[in-house]
Image (cartoon, rainbow, N blue to C red):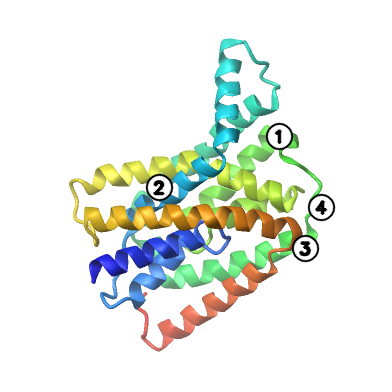
Amino acid sequence: MNWFEALFLGLIQGLTEFLPISSSAHLRIVGELLPGAQDPGAAFTAITQLGTETAVLVYFWKDIVRIVKAWFGSLAGRVPRSDPDARMGWLIILGSLPIAVLGLLFQDQIESTFRSLWIVATMLIVFGIILAIADAVGKQQRTLDQLSYKHGILYGFAQAMALIPGVSRSGGTITAGLLMGYTREAAARYAFLLAIPAVFGSGLYQLVKSLDEPMVYGGWETAGATLVAFIVGFIIIGWFLKYVSTRGYGLFVWYRILLGVVIYVLLGFGVLNA
């Protein structure tokens, strides 16, 4: 049964990581509904995210290699720092600082208090409404080559909000991008790139920790879930970028609100344990 549960949770991770609906919230909720009825834990969540972020590396491989080469070239003086790819490298580093600092400062709360389903349900609804407002009022004129260092920092703080399950890493950064006037596709693309250092850092940290601490699922089960998350996540990236280039985020907004309300009801009737 543990194998089935772990692989199913890997499927959920892959389906939800890149959509603005919070993968960590879904893992938290689904874990309570499975036969074992327990939270899979922050460590399992972080490690399976390594699978979905590897999907980002594969999908954006050419872009990433170009950015890395330009960034190192700017350090050596071979490429001007004003080069768009070199700037993107610096912006990704700058935007990753808030979540790294806040993640270390609030590690205990992230692994305990913030995982309360009352908080998850509230964040799903509140940030769903904020996403709807951003999608409606955002000018959607800016492209990624217009990304400034100020906006890079704001993106970073928006991403850091995803330390609270229910906010959504992509949802937070996409919402910030829309409010700053970026197009839907540009906001989503930068959200994926910005997540790479944070997710790999968190996942590898939790992987090392798990070697000395017990986890809900064993090493092989977690590895299987991570592989499933990679395969499904790779498919979802392409679909999502095409979807948001022609349509709004209304579908995800209504889903978030409905899911939040359902969680409140299930908690109220004792079906779920907060």
The residues tagged by marks 2 and 1 sit, at their Cα atoms, a distance apart of 28 Å
Check disc 4 and give the amino acid type: Lys
Q: Earlier in the sequence, mark 4 or mark 2?
A: 2
- Residue drawn at 24 percent across, 61 percent down: 217
Name the side, left or right, on which 263 lies relative to 189. Answer: left
Name the side, left or right, on which 78 lies relative to 26. Answer: right
Check disc 1 and give the amino acid type: Ser
Q: Circle 3 — which element?
A: helix
Q: Are marks 2 and 1 in contact (CB under 8 Å)?
A: no
Q: Residue furthest top?
A: 77
- Residue drawn at 49 percent across, 44 percent down: 99
Residue 165 picture location, percent across and down? 46, 61
Query: Residue beneath label 1, please?
Result: 148
The residues tagged by marks 4 and 2 sit, at their Cα atoms, a distance apart of 33 Å
Residue 136, numbered circle:
3
Name the side, left or right, on which 43 lies relative to 92. Answer: left
Q: Circle 2 — which element?
A: helix
The residues tagged by marks 3 and 2 sit, at their Cα atoms, a distance apart of 33 Å
Query: Residue beneath label 2, please?
Result: 50
